[in-house]
Image: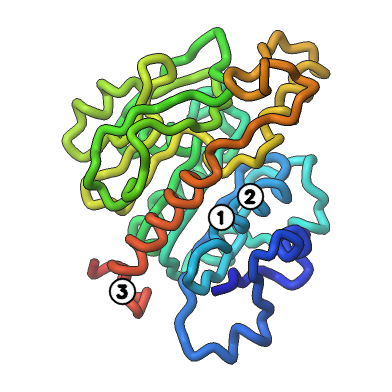
Amino acid sequence: MPIKIPDQLPARDILTSERIDVMDESTAIKQDIRPMKVILFNLMPDKITTETQIARILGSSPLQIELTLLRTDSYTGTNTPESHLTSFYKVFDDIKDDYFDGLIITGAPVEHIHYEDVVYWQELKSVMQWADNHCFSQFYICWAAQAALYHQHGIEKENKDQKYFGIYNYKRHDFSHPLTRGFDDTIGMPVSRYTKINPSDILNNNDLHLLFDCPNSGAALVTNQNRRKTYMFNHLEYDRTTLADEYKRDKERGLSTDVPDNYYPGNDTNEMPTMNWRAHSRLLFLNWISDIYQNTPYNLSKLKEV
């Protein structure tokens, strides 16, 4: 089934060229089904790239998904045209009375700032608290996952001087969890962060469940016990060249960033990076969507009763 996104969203042409089905409003209203409603709270500076990555993954689902885009109202970056934000994005006041099957919150390049000092921290907290009664399932990515663990469980991130950057291998801990159904024993995930969550902090919390980790860069995938909150500290949603683009950007800024680990063939930055995480990326999000589909109420206004 296609994903429903705004007609003029730049992602539409990209997804269509990749033969991912998209649906316009006039076609959607003729469908005698309730689409799965997912809201993407996009904290990334380049919102167009991130919304396309997420729409690409959701568009591979057999279910009809309606994607709503949300941005911060307390802060407006300069990396996305204002016309794009005005045309395609909502702010919290626009959606606070609505209900959704799923919420996805992206990472953000603010990991060196303490949570309370992030300019939109209060707004982010409001969205997380709102989601408990308005979204059946919540999916947090990278910095947002760390922020959610801090806000919800008081778990601190551990800062590192050297950046975790590249494709890291992670070990699976649970072979029966619905979220990782079909996964291999170890998987590679794109990583780009100066911080980590210690697996021991997850294991010592009775409400959290560790699914993947590695000795070096820590926890990779965590859920809470009722499976309605998922925390992914890496970037399975990344495109083939996303790490390459970040590497070039860092070098242009004069940062001492090493070549991404296990990414370029022969560690040669002139070679096309090898993409070996796409299958697990789609599998993870499809498992998440499937779990929502099987458990969310048809009438979303009844979420407070679930």
Q: Secondary structure at mark 3?
A: loop
Relative to 274, does residue 83 appear above or below in the rendering? Answer: below
- Real-space Cα separation, disc 3 to disc 1, in angstroms: 23 Å
Mark 2 is surrounded, within 10 Å at the Cα level, by few (under 14), some (14 to 19) or many (20 or more) other residues, namely some
Residue topped by disc 2 = 53
Check contact, mark 3 vs mark 2: CB within 8 A.
no
Going by the image, does 48 lie left or right of 67? right
Q: Secondary structure at mark 2?
A: helix
Which one is earlier in the sequence, the residue at label 3 or at label 2? Answer: 2
Residue topped by disc 3 = 297
Residue at the image position 36 percent from the left and 68 percent from the top: 293
Q: How is the image coloured?
A: rainbow
Q: Amino acid at mark 2?
A: Gln
> Where is residue 81 shown, x and y percent of the image?
82, 50
Mark 1 is surrounded, within 10 Å at the Cα level, by few (under 14), some (14 to 19) or many (20 or more) other residues, namely many
> Where is residue 170 shown, x and y percent of the image?
40, 27
Q: Quadrant of the N terminus?
A: bottom right
Q: Amino acid at mark 3?
A: Pro
Q: Amino acid at mark 1?
A: Ile
Residue at the image position 72 percent from the left and 28 percent from the top: 244
Check contact, mark 1 vs mark 2: CB within 8 A.
yes
Judged by depth in the image, the label closer to the viewer, 3 or 2, is 2
> Where is residue 7 shown, x and y percent of the image?
74, 72
Q: Quadrant of the C terminus?
A: bottom left
Q: Can residue 86 be seen in the rendering of this structure? A: no
> Where is residue 191 shown, x and y percent of the image?
54, 27
Residue topped by disc 1 = 57
- Real-space Cα separation, disc 3 to disc 2, in angstroms: 27 Å
Toward the viewer: 243 or 183?
183
Of all residues, the one furthest to the left in this rendering is 206
Going by the image, does 206 lie left or right of 298? left
